[in-house]
Image: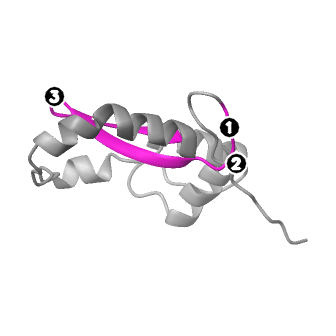
Amino acid sequence: MAQKVNISITDDLDGSENAETVSFGFEGKTYEVDLAKKNRAKLEKALGAFIEAGRKTSAPRRSRAAANSSGPDRAVVRAWAKSQGIQVSERGRISAETIAKYEAAH
């Protein structure tokens, strides 16, 4: 049996459809928020003067450990995989296929 999974991103502020992830930074921290066109325009208007007056900087380099820490919690993925009958080791790398299945289910 074939399955088709559709992912719909909704606006984090008002729940409207067709949102896109917007990243921004403040005081050394980076944030992401999912916004539809209307709320994205509000954010751009609110930040416009600051962006005009500001300087672009290069993103700080991420260490290998930091790069590997992105994504779902590995312990949670392992527990979920075991509950689904998917073979996964107690330690070490989790296959990209298993992580993709976990993300599709959540």
Using residue 56 as the reference point, say whether residue 40 is left or right of it: right
In reply to whether residue 25 is colored magenta, the answer given is: yes
Q: Position of residue 62 (x, y in %)?
A: 17, 51
- Residue at point 23%, 47% (across, down): 66
- The C terminus - image quarter: top right
Look at 50% across and 64% down and name the residue there. Answer: 96
- Closer to the camera, 10 or 67? 10
Residue identifier under label 2: 105
Within 10 Å of the Cα at label 3, are there few (<14), some (14-19), or many (20+) other Cα atoms? few
Q: Nearer the viewer, mark 1 or mark 2?
A: 1
- Residue for point 86% across, 72% down: 2
Identity of the amino acid at label 3? Glu
Are circles 3 and 1 on residues that touch, CB within 8 Å? no
Q: Which mark is residue 16?
A: 1
Looking at marks 3 and 1 on the same chain, the residue that comes earlier in the sequence is marked by 1
Lower sequence index among marks 2 and 3? 3
Residue 38, image x and y in percent? 56, 40
Residue 46 place in picture, x, y as percent: 34, 31
Can residue 28 be seen?
A: yes
Q: Quadrant of residue 17?
A: top right
Compared with 49, 81 (above or below) is: below
The residue at the point 91 percent across, 71 percent down is 1
Cα–Cα gap, marks 3 and 1: 29 Å
Residue 27 image label: 3
The residue stretch that appears in magenta = 15-35
Q: How are the residues colored?
A: one colour
Classify mark 1: helix, strand or loop: loop
In this rendering, position of residue 74 left or right of residue 2 = left
Q: Amino acid at mark 2?
A: Ala
The residue mark sitting in front, 3 or 1, is: 1
Residue type at mark 1: give it: Ser
The answer for how far apart the CA atoms under marks 2 and 3 are is 35 Å
